[in-house]
Structure formats: C-alpha cells, structure tokens
Amino acid sequence: MRAPGRSRGMCEWGDFAGDAKALDDLLEAGRSGSLPPFLLLSQPGVGATDQRRCSELWTRDRRAAAVAARLALDFQFRPADGRKIRLGYLSNDFHDHATALLLIETLEAHDRERFCVNAYSYGADDGKSMRRRLVGAFDAFIDIEALSDGDAARAIHRDEVDILIDLKGFTANARSGILMLRPAPVQVNYLGYPGTLGEDICDYIITDDYVTPFASAGDYSESFAYMPNSYQPHGRAGPIGRMPLRASMGLPEQGVVFCCFNQAYKFTPEMFDVWCRLLDAVPGSVLWLLGAPMAEGNLRNEAWRRGVNGDRLIFAPDMAQGEHLARLQLADLVLDTAPYNAHTTASDALWAGVPIVTCSGSTFPSRVAGSLLRAVGLTELIAVDLDDYFDLAYRLAVDPAHLAELKAKLARNRADAALFDVPAYTRDLEGLYRSMWNRRSAGLPPAALIPTA
C-alpha cells in the first residue's frame, strides 16, 4: 500500500478516498505501532475520539514494556518544601524551528524567583542565532541526544525536575519513550502536538476552552489545563521589516493576493476546490503558497483540472523569520486549511497585520486559528462551514473598503491583544504550573485546571 502521508505531502489526490480508507483500515486493525497518530490530524472526517484511539494504539506495546522498565528504575520523587518549582522542557526543536519561535519570549520571561527552567534537548545544534538565544534562555541546557531513553530519563530524574513539559508529542523525531518512563512527578503535553498522547504519558495538556471545549474532555487522556485566552504563545519579536515590492516576490502589481503558507500536507481536495472557486470568482487574483517542490506540479495540475490557470499559483521560497514577516504584509487575505488549521503561520500573519479566514471543526488542530482570532478580537472571521468560508472570503476580496476596515481593526487590537502579550501569557502559564504542582504536593490526582476570573 502506498503511504498516505507521503501522498498527502505531494498533493497526489488521485486516490484520496482510497488513502482515507487505508487509514481507517489501519485504525480498525488495532495493531500497535501501525498508524502514526500525526496522519489523522489532517484527515477529514476524523474526530477526536478516533485520534485518541489511534494515539493509544500507536504506543500500546511500548507503554506495556515501559511498565517493567519503570519498576526497574524505581524513581522516587522528593516532596515539596517551598523551593522553586523545577521545569524541564523536552524537545529536539531547540533551534530555528516554529516551536522555538513561538516559545522563546515566554521562556525568557519565566519568573526565576519561583521557577528553575531547564532544557532537555535531543536535537542537533544548527549553529544559528536562535540556538544561542535558546541556550541563554534556560538556567541549564542539557544535551541528551546521545543518551538512550533510559539514561535520558535518569538524567531528568537526577536533576529533580518537578514538571516535565513535552514539546513534541508525535511529531517528527519525537522521543515519547522518555515520557513513558515517568522521570518527573508531573508531565505535560504542550504546544508541539495538537492532540492527546494517550493513556499514561502526560498528566495535563495546555489548552484553551476554544480548541478543546470542556465537553470534549473524554477524547483526551490528559486533564485540561486551560489558558484564559489562547493556548498558543506568540511574542512581538521586534519590529516588522519594511514591506517589499510585490514584483520582488513574484506577485502581480494588481489584483487580490490570497495566501496560505501552511505545509502542503494540510491541503485537501475539498479545500482546494474552495480556493479555486475564489480564484475563478475574483478576476486577477492569485494564490500565494509556500514553496513545496514535491507538490507544486501536482497543485498546478489540480488548478487546471478545476478550470483555473495553474500559473495563478505562486510559490514562495523559505525565508528567515524577519524577511518572512515583512513579505507577509503583501498578502491581502490568508486562507486557512481544514481540518488541520494554520498554527504558527496563522499567528505570524496576524502579527504582520493580515486577516485570516478559517473554518473551525471539532478537533484541536481544526480549531487553532479560531482560538487565535478570538485572542485578537476577530471572531467574525471564523466560518461555520466551507460554504460560509467561501462567502466570507469572497465578500472581503471584492470589497476593499471592508477588508481595509478589518485590517485597521486588527492593527488597533494588536497592541493590546492577549495573543501577543508575553508577560501576561507567561504569568498565566506559570499559574497553571503552580496549580499542577500544588495538586501533586497535596496528594491529589490531575484534574481540569480552569483559570479564575
């Protein structure tokens, strides 16, 4: 069977329904380790219940093996004694990566009078400035790349980490085996993976009441730790550079620039149908996409198949963050994907002053852009279904005055928006960490943590 994940990344949609059935068959087969949970995040028609089931099947055999390993390790945890709470952030993305770009200012803002903050890194040093900045943001930066899961867990336990925060989940190169050994008394699923990790891995998931309404609690093994606004951090990262000329980015001087800088695996035929309808309905418009060498030819062909000139798709090269934010200002309107929304790319667009139209679904990854829009006061850009999404995007595209009003509202809101308020976000996050630790210290099990007014 062709790997569905590879075909999605290449936008090979000839047998999209067959790929979906292949995923369903793998899930129904119930074999541990056979279906990576990440694939289901972008699969239309999959609910959070199936995503949890997939996560637990993926790790079932490894979790069973970890029980014996934990008994052999026999980790004991020291009681609370009024000391600083020791946080340990676990990731292989401590370099120039989307997670680091989102989180760096929060890491730097942690209250060192109350918290000791360690990094446990199992990724390579890319030699770039973000890596150096990250090393400086922690009280200790421990490289565990060469260690086995068992030795990494011993190192974390030896450092007496109170709360271990996983930033990877089931994304590429994750090492969930470390978490399965339970080297810390409290373990948290945060930011890197928009879904549950399944039973007996993490105690809490950092979230908000938009991406995971309380009624969905049964679809998550972790207890909800609710941030009062959006779960996602996003710093201000200095001034945005001067907007370049359209021609320098390969864009036409006139016409509406629709934009989506999401990875190509998030695209679906149904969403691409809507985008092509918009291109057809708005003369002179173009669709500006992030460069995807393995998918570009297929996407142009898919546009032609829908009666749209494939040359109206314009592909943007990778750029450093500052240059990327500057060029984003050229976009008139960002078009989100569903069921896997824009995450970092959405908050980047909003910081650059560009509105985004989204369609919220029922799962965590399908509600992220809605959470971000709520946090900047633009809930009117959240569509209820794809027909509403088309209508909303079309109305904005053909009404420059209305679009200008929205951009002006975003510009006004941005200065005080919860989404970009790093000090307030960090204090709220630390409040959740304290609540987790207080429950643990009192001998209480994990439970939903809801911010008080």
Image: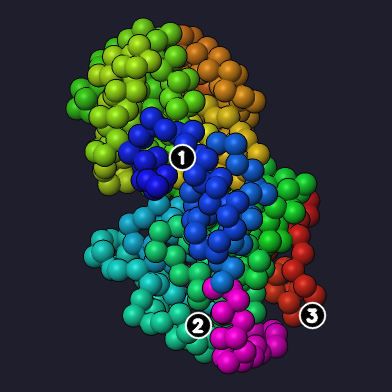
Which image quadrant for residue 293?
top left
Residue at the (52%, 40%) spot, across then down: 21
Name the spot of residue 67 as percent of width and height, x first.
62, 81
**Amino acid type of disc 1?**
Asp
Residue 371, relative to residue 426: is it above or below? above
* Residue type beneath disc 3: Gly
Indicate left or right for 14 with 416 as reference: left
Does residue 297 appear left or right of residue 133 in this picture? Answer: left
- x, y percentage for residue 424? 60, 54
The magenta-colored residue range is: 62-90
Sequence-wise first label, 2 or 3: 2
Q: Earlier in the sequence, mark 2 or mark 1?
A: 1
Residue occupying image coordinates x 48% and y 48%: 39
Q: Is residue 74 magenta?
A: yes
Q: Which residue is mark 2?
A: 153
431 above or below 277?
below
Q: Residue at x 52, y 66 (%)?
A: 166
